[in-house]
Image (cartoon, rainbow, N blue to C red):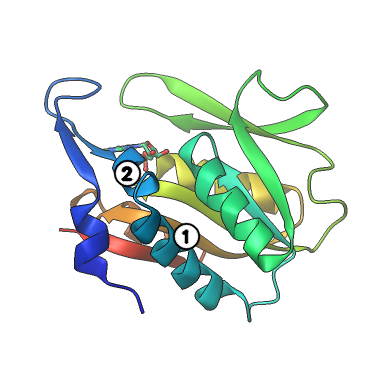
Amino acid sequence: MIDRDFLLSTIRDVPDFPKPGIVFKDITTLLNNAEAFTMLMEHLETRYKAMNLDFVAGIESRGFIFGAALATRLGIGFVLIRKKGKLPYTTVSEKYALEYGVDEIEVHIDAFRGEHKRVLLIDDLIATGGTAEAAAKLIKKLDQELVEACFIISLEFLEGKKRLEKITPVYSVLEIA
Ligand code: AMP
């Protein structure tokens, strides 16, 4: 069973990081708590084991931790969605708006080993939803079936989940109002 209050209590708030006014949700204190990390991964495994997934795709960099752990629990492959310029082979990319300027994420063109694969997208946290929306578009661009987007934490007040729900089902483990 999942104890959401316990999991929330293991996430550390770091005020004014990386800049003034932002409260950074630090999940390193969840990861180094064996009881919390195991409880979370058991919960995700239970949710996704009957969904007949082919791949988990994680967003750099904290999405890699949860995504890779989940993929091995499900016995399926893991795909890396990275910031521009990090992946060595041929990529497809998607731009997205930041508060100031634009950023870009990429995935290897052959990452899903074919088309119409059932993919779960995962990241640690959804804030405005810009990063996840670009990742979802990338998966669709490669003609894959995006089954759901999963986040450990949703910052509900920023309404990223609402934005993303227009293009994919969304699940969050913990909601912060
Ligand atoms: P967004 O595109 O606005 O939904 O931002 C999501 C990405 O930024 C995720 O990869 C998060 O890890 C990171 N992020 C945004 N806001 C926070 C926050 N308050 N605490 C921790 N990570 C954050």
Q: Height in image: 59 above or below 72?
A: above
Which residue is farthest right?
Answer: 114
Relative side of 102 to 59, left or right: left
Secondary element under disc 1, as helix, strand or loop, is strand
Q: Amino acid at mark 2?
A: Thr
What residue did someone put label 2 on?
128
Q: Tell me the crowding category of disc 2: few under 14, some 14 to 19, or many 20 or more residues within 10 angstroms, Cα based.
A: many
Image disc number at residue 28:
none
What residue did someone put label 1 on?
150
Q: How far across and how far down the image is residue 127, in percent?
A: 31, 45
Q: Amino acid at mark 1?
A: Cys
Relative side of 136 to 17, left or right: right
Q: How far across and how far down the image is residue 106, in percent?
A: 65, 32
Q: Is mark 2 within 8 Å of ligand 1?
A: yes
| Mark 1 → mark 2, Cα distance in angstroms | 15 Å
Name the mark nearer the viewer: 1 or 2: 1
Q: How far across and how far down the image is residue 42, in percent?
A: 48, 69
Q: How far across and how far down the image is residue 38, in percent?
A: 44, 61
Q: Residue at point 33% right, 43% down? A: 27
